[in-house]
Amino acid sequence: NAGVTQTPKFRVLKTGQSMTLLCAQDMNHEYMYWYRQDPGMGLRLIHYSVGEGTTAKGEVPDGYNVSRLKKQNFLLGLESAAPSQTSVYFCASLTPGQPQHFGDGTRLSIL
Amino acid sequence: EDQVTQSPEALRLQEGESSSLNCSYTVSGLRGLFWYRQDPGKGPEFLFTLYSAGEEKEKERLKATLTKKESFLHITAPKPEDSATYLCAVLNSGGYQKVTFGTGTKLQVIP
């Protein structure tokens, strides 16, 4: 039972490049989330999904897009990367009323 | 707007020196308060859920308590392996299972 798996684990991009971060969970959770974690700012919600085919904006959605075509997968896209998007990105999933389960993060640097 | 404030930001203890971490919160309809542990380069790992004031949970050297305005994570006779960042989060009664995180307390236990 892998839980929440994030790929890739590390990535370096140049400004203006695009990429997709993949999150996969095998716990049959309805809710999935993308966060970014920056020093001194804690975990901030980018986008979330309450079920397959649904997505919604969180606290800091600008510059990101998401898709949830399958229940187990939640994709985070950066269309035109900017240095301000250098961060550690975490995916999480949950079932209502229960704590979130997190992946181990994607460390993204944008030069 | 839900808010979570953790103190202190960092704590350095000698092995065996007990202490407490604080999590103060304001939330519109608390459905649960969570404590997580985060090791460097890893995602947050769930420790406890507290649902109502007066509730307590224990696990090894850790004990979490909850009042109507704050939660404490008590660490009794800590060991170096307890060194980590401890995160507090609240789940509100909103429709999308909104979780708000504090910025964490970084604990270092010195042998």
Image (cartoon, rainbow, N blue to C red):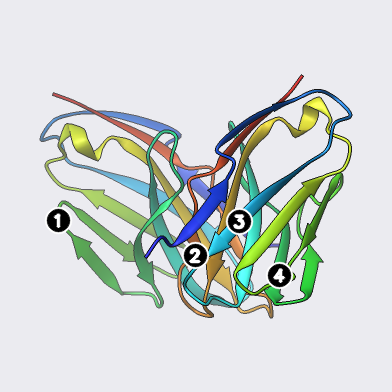
Q: In the rendered structure, the residue with mark 2 lies on which chain? A: A
Which element is circle 1 on?
loop
> Which label is found at residue A49?
4
How far apart are labels 1 and 3 at the CA level?
32 Å
Q: In x, y percent, where is residue B111?
A: 13, 23
Circles 4, 1 touching at the beta carbon (< 8 Å): no
How far apart are labels 1 and 2 at the CA level?
22 Å
Q: Amino acid at mark 2?
A: Gln
| Foreground: disc 1 or disc 3 | 3
With B22 as the anchor, is B17 left or right in this view?
left
Q: In x, y percent, where is residue A59?
A: 76, 54
Q: Which residue is mark 1?
A: B60
Work out which residue is located at the far top of the displayed protein and give it: A111
Q: Which residue is mark 3?
A: A23
| Foreground: disc 3 or disc 4 | 3
For this rendering, which residue is in front, A48 or B24? A48
How far apart are labels 3 and 4 at the CA level?
12 Å
| Foreground: disc 1 or disc 2 | 2
- Tell me the quarter of the picture where residue B34 sits: bottom left
Q: In the rendered structure, the residue with mark 1 lies on which chain? A: B
Q: Which residue is mark 2?
A: A100
How far apart are labels 3 and 2 at the CA level?
14 Å
Circles 1, 3 touching at the beta carbon (< 8 Å): no
Q: In the rendered structure, the residue with mark 3 lies on which chain? A: A
How far apart are labels 4 and 1 at the CA level?
35 Å
Q: In the rendered structure, the residue with mark 4 lies on which chain? A: A
Q: Amino acid at mark 3?
A: Cys
